[in-house]
Image (cartoon, grey):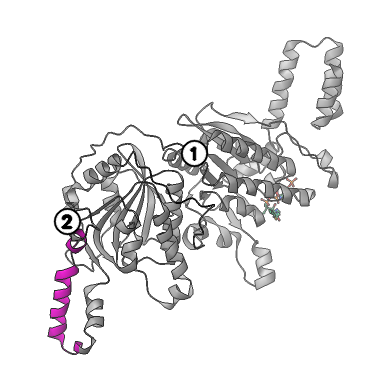
Amino acid sequence: MVCKYAKLCFATGAGAAMFAQIIVRNLGGVSMKDILQELEDRRTVARAGGGARRVEAQHAKGKLTARERVELLLDEGSFEEFDMFVQHRCTDFGMEENRHPGDGVITGWGTINGRMVYVFSQDFTVLGGSVSETHAAKICKIMDMAIQNGAPVIGMNDSGGARIQEGVSSLAAYGEVFQRNILASGVVPQISLIMGPCAGGAVYSPAMTDFIFMVKDSSYMFVTGPDVVKTVTNEVVTAEELGGASTHTRKSSVADGASENDVELLAETRRLFDFLPLNNREKAPVRPFFDDPGRVEMSLDTLVPDNPNQPYDMKELILKIADEGDFFEIQKDFAGNIICGFIRLEGQTVGVVANQPMVLAGCLDIDASRKAARFVRFCDAFEIPILTLVDVPGFLPGTGQEYGGVIKHGAKLLFAYGEATVPKVTVLTRKTYGGAYVVMSSKHLRGDFNYAWPTAEVAVMGAKGAVEILYRSELGDKDRIAARVKEYEDRFANPFVAAEKGFIDEVIMPHSTRRRVARAFASLRGKKQANPWKKHDNIPL
Ligand code: HXC
């Protein structure tokens, strides 16, 4: 018995003092109460993290502790912890004296509204949440279980990066986490919450997950920090400017959203989680709904303005289609010309992609194509049906776009829609011109239901542009050109030419859109479609 405790004390680094205590207990005849008390004592030490002073410092920065985050994210009392007593094995730089049970990360599983999820939460109060060999092994353990058991992984990142004292071992440890991010991709949803520092190569783990959300003012992500940037490029920039939430939600699009504080972020994550399936073999959960799927919205009949150049807010249509007007938007502060997010129809999750005429007239550009392509691929990977709302005058022209590779980036969205085998329902509200018409989940990319409002215009381009090309020699004659424009509009500024060819399945009344779309998705619940066998595709990256 004594020998067993000796091993435990020294292996876990609890040391001679605790061993001596246990011997005394044993000599005096240890009672069951003492044994149980010892477990409680050990748990108390582990739960204290880096100690009261560091916890206070964490709170002073407006941040919750790793444990508080887990408690708030998961259903009350549902958390089951793994590896609470794991400690690092490093003996360099005096590290044998600097051991903490748990080694700077809390891992385990629990539930969100009753559905299972694996979590890890880095504890900045323990060695700055830095990643050691054992710290990473704890993360890898829950990732392996998540892949095997088919439940999502949510990582709460708050770390100074690779544990400097461990050198290459910590780099190797990161590599192990990266490999699992890759294997888990498309198998279980992975969500990264950036709730403190996340720098250097460490950023590449969140980067490979499905969604990244940040906390404003208390989190940042960058590959090289402000000091290195200054040395190498002479740029002077703060950590917030370089990699804060506003940078990543507005400029880089690395992050999918940002919250005001930890509490808001955790609540929003629970909301998102409810839209998602647990894995790629299961459907998203069906939630109770209290909204008539046949609800008619007469106001939609006047949503599209008489003037074709006047914008309107596509979000209004999304909200009016969705059950209870509930919409979880992804990347709302980036590439506003396209809107992506989740709604429910008859309680079932649907991914929405919609052109937004209020921004850049709803044109597709590099940013919009990348944003929507990744979203479409997420939906397809996890069997989430896609609703596409189209009002797109084409791809944005300009050297900026061409030099930036709009050809390759636009192709991403085209490719994503074309390879997707989930149910796809498309509604054309107004303009849908040129290549963008084909890209936006057209019939030609295996759209299942392609509806158009009577206001839709399916054409190679707008009437004015078309006439200027077709009748260049008549450009000096204003009346003649006006007549040509009218002629072109009469022919193409409507959905009927496309409907005659079967490219549009039905021209529908705007007010009935929710009912039509809900019925379309209901009819597609048994859809089964497969692509030809391949190792994997070669999407234009
Ligand atoms: C070991 C670390 C650490 C690290 C922080 N700490 N980062 N210990 N390895 N990487 C420790 C500190 O020594 C300190 O311990 C405690 O954590 C809190 O750190 P502070 O510096 O006091 O906190 P703060 O002022 O808030 O600054 C946070 C910080 C800073 C900006 C993250 O700690 C920092 O710059 N750390 C180093 C970051 C870094 O260069 N990491 C390596 C990146 S490269 P005490 O005992 O005093 O409380 C990388 C490669 C990954 O990660 C590659 C993957 C392939």
Q: Is residue 316 magenta?
A: no
Residue 469, given in percent of the width and then of the height, sits at 26, 82
Residue 263, compared with residue 178, is above or below; it is above
- Provide the secondary structure element on which disc 1 rests: loop
Residue 216, compared with residue 273, is above or below; it is below
The disc placed on residue 24 is none
Which residue type does callout 1 highlight? Answer: Asn
Give the magenta part as a residue range. 474-499
Give the camera-side residue of 467 and 72.
467
Seen in the image, is 121 located left or right of residue 442? right
Residue 98, given in percent of the width and then of the height, sits at 79, 40
Residue 386, given in percent of the width and then of the height, sits at 36, 49
Residue at image mark 1: 279
Q: Quadrant of residue 285?
A: top left
Seen in the image, is 379 located left or right of residue 489? right
| Mark 1 vs 2, N-terminal side | 1
SS assignment for the magenta stretch, majority: helix
Residue at image mark 2: 302
Residue 68 visible in this rendered orientation of the protein: no
Q: Report the residue at 65% width, 37% height from top.
A: 141
Depth check, mark 1 against mark 2: the one in front is: 1
